[in-house]
Image: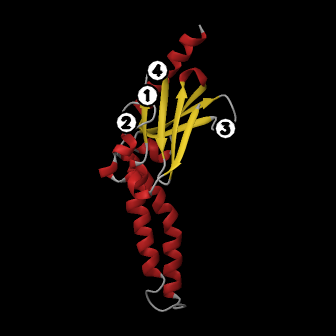
Amino acid sequence: MTEHTEMQAEEGAADPANHAVLAAPQTGGELTELHPNHVKILRIQAFLVAAPFVLGSLVLEMAQLVPPGVFVVPVLLAALFLIIRVPLRRHHARGYAMSDDRLRVVRGLLFRSDTVVPFGRVQHIDVNQGPLERYYDLATLTLHTAGSHNASVHLPGILNQDALAMREVIRSHIKRETV
C-alpha cells in the first residue's frame, strides 16, 4: 500500500475552481466524486458537534454573565461556518478511482492523503452503514490489508449498491489471484 501525504493550502485543496488538484493524480486517472448526499450527512454530524456549544452560549447569554451578544454571536457564526461551509469543503476534498487491479482514495484539506490499495493486498472487505447512511442509501467501503500502518482504507459517501458492486469486483479479483 502506498500513501503520499503533502501539505497544501486549504483554499486550493477544496475550491471548485481548483478541482484540478484532485484531478491531477500521481498514479493517473480521473477521480470519481462521492455522492452528493454525503454532504448532508457531514452537515448533520457538524450540527451535532456544534449544538452543545450553541446551547452553552445561549445559557450564558440568558444568565447575563456576559454583555448581550458578546459570546452568543461569535459562537453562532462559528457554528454556521462549521455546519454550512466545512462539510462542503471536506466533501470536495475526497475522491476515488478504481482500476482493474487497485483502488485509489484521495482525501484531506490541509494534509492530503493519496492512498493506493492493490487488490492483491486486500485481506477482507467491509461495507458499513450507520443510521444516517442507511437513511440516505449510502455506505462506507472498508478495505483491510496486511500490515499495521494504514491497514484499512475507508471510502465513505458512496451509494450502497455501488459499494456492494465494488466489493464483488474486488472479491472476484482476489479469487482469481488465489487460484
Separation of residues labelled 1 and 4 (CA atoms): 10 Å
Q: Residue pushed farthest top?
A: 179
Disc 3 crowd rating (10 Å Cα; few below 14, some 14-19, many 20+) is few
Q: Which mark is residue 86?
A: none
Secondary structure at badge 3 equals loop
Relative image position of residue 92 (x, y in whole percent): 38, 48
Viewer can see residue 40: no
Separation of residues labelled 4 and 2 (CA atoms): 17 Å
Residue where numbered disc 3 is placed: 149
Disc 4 crowd rating (10 Å Cα; few below 14, some 14-19, many 20+) is some
Label whose residue precedes the other's in the sequence (3 or 2):
2
Relative image position of residue 57 (x, y in whole percent): 51, 79
Front in this rendered view, residue 155 or 128: 155
Label whose residue precedes the other's in the sequence (4 or 2):
2
Q: Quadrant of the C terminus?
A: top right
Would you say the residues marked 1 and 4 are in contact, meaning their CB atoms lie under 8 Å apart? Answer: yes
Q: Quadrant of residue 88?
A: bottom left
Asked if 81 appears above or below 121 in the picture, the reply is below
Secondary structure at badge 4 equals helix
Q: Which mark is residue 98?
A: 1
Badge 3 amino acid:
His
Colouring mode (rainbow / by chain / secondary structure / one colour): secondary structure
